[in-house]
Amino acid sequence: MNTIHRKIIHIDMDCFFIAVEMRDQPELYHIPAAVGGLPEKRGVIATCNYPARQFGIHSAMSSAQAKARCPELVILPSDITKYRQVSSDIHSILKQFTNMIEPLSLDEAYLDVTHCDHHSGSATLIAQNIRQQIEAKLGLTASAGVAPNKLIAKIASDMNKPNGLCVVTPAQTPIFVSQLPVAKLFGVGKATCRKLDKLGVVYCSDLQKLPLSELHHNFGKFGGILHQYCRGIDNRPVNCSRIRKSLSIEHTFSKDISHFDQLIPHAKHLITQLKQQHQKKAKHRIIKRVGVKLKFADFKQTTAEITAYQITLDIILPLIRRARSRSLKPIRLLGLSITFDTDNIVDQQQQIDLLWAG
Ligand code: TTP
Ligand code: MG
């Protein structure tokens, strides 16, 4: 029997925010440069270019630490409006090939080109054409992965970064996946990795040896998913009607906060801002859960969540208390989030458009 394999492309822009800035200020190409918050304001790095990465600088590192590693690092403020416009231009290029597009963030998307006729249906040539157009029209480089499913396509797009293409055919998939460290698999974070390490699992080839029952026993439902992923099997569709599931906002304090009462005005301000975002980006969506995130002075973070239909101080403060009780360290950052009810959507197309617009 002939199995029909899907053709999935994952596109990921290289060093996205700073790449846009380097294009607009070419003198930045050869010096360490980043987009992020100011060190004096306790900002963090959003992303940085390769000269900066050589110093060990990376996303989410504090700008102060980045400057300590590389004093000549140039840090530019984030211009999100500009990045959204570029993202929308990228989307226009992708749309030439298919409507089966699932945006993951401003700089990343999956495409299902299984039924696309361009380039005689060659996913490899389509991916190359997309990368060429992004470079010619936008002056930016993108990396792409081509594979029979989303799991492998995303891992592949990272293989030849920057400005690279990696194609994994259905026939190559079993070998490709068996050589991967399990940490590369979607959903395998630090905690799962540690647990797998204790079971003697480092590579997918090790994971393949564990029986399904043992995976279920250790990881519950996710055990079944791991059993498939480590064999390169992933049946998740490219979800082109993906809609925003949540909204979040956060603030890093100019000085760490030790007293609970000092958090209250910040919480009030963030609630107002999050309500405004809700109005702007997801007007008719019904809130299902409300959450808080705290980052402590040692950069450890924790979250607390509750089922709620609105975001108010009465709901937020007990959550902050709960999260606060987990550490004695002063607080560096407060974040708030709302999760939407996905069963109850008023205007789906509008939501999709807004997701793409960021
Ligand atoms: P990424 O695709 O993760 O990173 P990148 O495009 O900068 O670099 P790479 O070439 O390795 O893909 O994220 C896309 C953009 O999202 C990034 O340019 C800045 C922003 N971002 C943050 O603001 N904070 C973060 O912690 C991360 C990871 C990304
Ligand atoms: Mg990227």
Image (cartoon, rainbow, N blue to C red):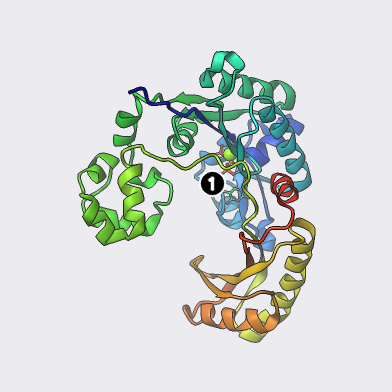
Residue lying at 31% horizontally and 54% vertically, measured from the top left: 223
Task: Find the residue positioned furthest to the front.
Answer: 1
Q: Is residue 190 visible?
A: yes
Instruction: Answer with the quarter of the image where residue 106 lies.
Output: top right
Residue lying at 78% horizontally and 46% vertically, measured from the top left: 81
Per the image, the residue denoted by label 1 is 57
Q: Position of residue 229 (x, y in %)?
A: 36, 43
Numbered-mark total:
1
Specify the quarter for ligand 1: top right
Residue lying at 65% horizontally and 33% vertically, measured from the top left: 99
Q: Is residue 124 left or right of residue 13?
A: left
Q: Is residue 293 left or right of residue 166?
A: right
Q: Is mark 1 within 8 Å of ligand 1?
A: no
Q: Position of residue 5 (x, y in %)?
A: 43, 27
Q: Nearer the viewer, residue 87 or 98?
A: 98
Q: Is residue 335 visible?
A: no
Q: Is residue 22 left or right of residue 294?
A: right
Instruction: Check the image and report above or below for 318 versus 130.
Output: below
Q: Nearer the viewer, residue 140 or 72?
A: 140
Q: Quadrant of the N terminus?
A: top left
Instruction: Answer with the quarter of the image where residue 22 lies.
Output: top right
Instruction: Answer with the quarter of the image where residue 356 lies.
Output: top right
Q: Which amino acid lies under the numbered mark 1 shown in the image of this protein? A: Ile
Q: Position of residue 278 (x, y in %)?
A: 74, 63
Q: Position of residue 169 (x, y in %)?
A: 40, 24
Residue lying at 76% horizontally and 68% vertically, measured from the top left: 275
Residue neighbourhood size for the residue with mark 1, other residues' Cα within 10 Å, grouped as few (<14), some (14–19), many (≥20):
many
Task: Find the residue positioned furthest to the top.
Answer: 120
- Which secondary structure lies at badge 1? loop
